Image (cartoon, rainbow, N blue to C red):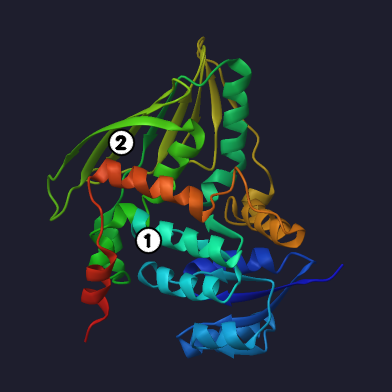
Amino acid sequence: MNKLKLAIIGLGNIASKHLPVLAQFDDVELVAFCDTNEARLHSVAAQYGVKQTFVDCKHILAEVEVDAVFSFVNVLNTFSVVTACLEAGRHTFLEKPPGISSAETRQLADLADEHGCLTMVGVNRRFYSSVKEAQQAIAAAGPLVSIVLDAPENLARVRALKFHPQEVIQHWIFANGIHGIDLLRYIGGEILQVQTVNRQWFDEQPDSFGALVEFKSGAIGHYISDWTSPGGWRMELRGRDIKILLEPLEQSQLIQRDGTTKPLPIDDIDLKFKAGFYAQDRYFLDCVRQKRSPEFPALTLRDAVETMKLIEAITGVVINPFSLRKRVFSG
């Protein structure tokens, strides 16, 4: 079997979680790396035995023939880098978020269609074994009645890292909250309507979000994101006489009406690697090898437009990407 040749653009923290997974696959060859940090570029390339290195994504796309590109660049560079990948005709896996507005995501989806590129957005919680087991348990007991997702954020910690520019922090729900909001949509299905109430308590921006989501199936989604209070993400799936608690999301337990509980199984691969990454990356690579478009449970760029629209509905914010980037990158 011929190996799939991959190029990696962006070698930061999230790449350090993907690369051990990609290196595990016998049918994959990492042939070229690109990063603007030359010290990191050469260190990571040496670690994985990659000879071809670049500091400009345009050069890696022009000079190296690969079967697919994995883009792990930062939030504000995602649109320009993925645009270059798609215009070069490269099948592309990109880490979330897929741009910083639904309009931007739609532009990328249109580009992918125009150039015949397969795409997939990295929202690994769709591929958690804990989530899969929870869905199966609810379905076996009857229809899903409601979803409760509590997804707080700790902006003080994010600011203390001094990694993200202020413009990203101001729109943190797009940059990171997308994981929880997409999971709500993934489990609930097609949306009929969204009702929201947001508040600004202690921060310089809204720091409390509440949404009631009505799904076509009849199920109701409850989204709660209070950035004012401590705690991790937790989710409940509620059905007939049972509910599934995921706290943290990487683990799930079944709770019955009589109070008995039972932990649901977790795939060992989600313990060996960052949860969901192995199944997610393998799925995209199989699509590339078989020349077929990713489908559910994957999040394609076209489907990601709907997730971005849901975030906009919850926040009441539609970002002007041009003005945002102008402030960030102008001298």
- For residue 85, above or below residue 153: below
Q: The N terminus appears in which quarter of the rendering?
A: bottom right
Question: In terms of image quadrants, where is residue 101?
Answer: bottom left
Residue 292 vertical placement versus 5 (above, below): above
The 10 Å Cα crowd at callout 2, few under 14, some 14 to 19, many 20 or more, is some
Image location of residue 204, percent across then percent down? 13, 56
Q: Which residue is mark 1?
A: 104
Query: In terms of secondary structure, where does tag 1 sit?
Result: helix
Placement of the C terminus among the 4 image quadrants: bottom left
Q: Residue furthest right?
A: 1
The CA distance from mark 1 to mark 2 is 26 Å
**What residue would you read off at disc 2?**
224
Question: Quick one: label 1, few (<14), some, or many (20+) residues within 10 Å?
Answer: some
Is residue 329 shown left or right of residue 179? left
Q: Nearer the viewer, residue 241 or 295?
A: 295
Residue 294 x %, y %: 63, 51
The residue positioned farthest toward the front in the image shown: 114
Query: Which residue occupies 62% across, 89% down?
Result: 63
> At 29% across and 42% down in the image, what residue appears?
313
Pointers 1 and 2 in contact (C-beta within 8 Å): no
Looking at this view, is 278 or 291 the one in front? Answer: 291
Q: Is residue 143 left or right of residue 193?
A: right
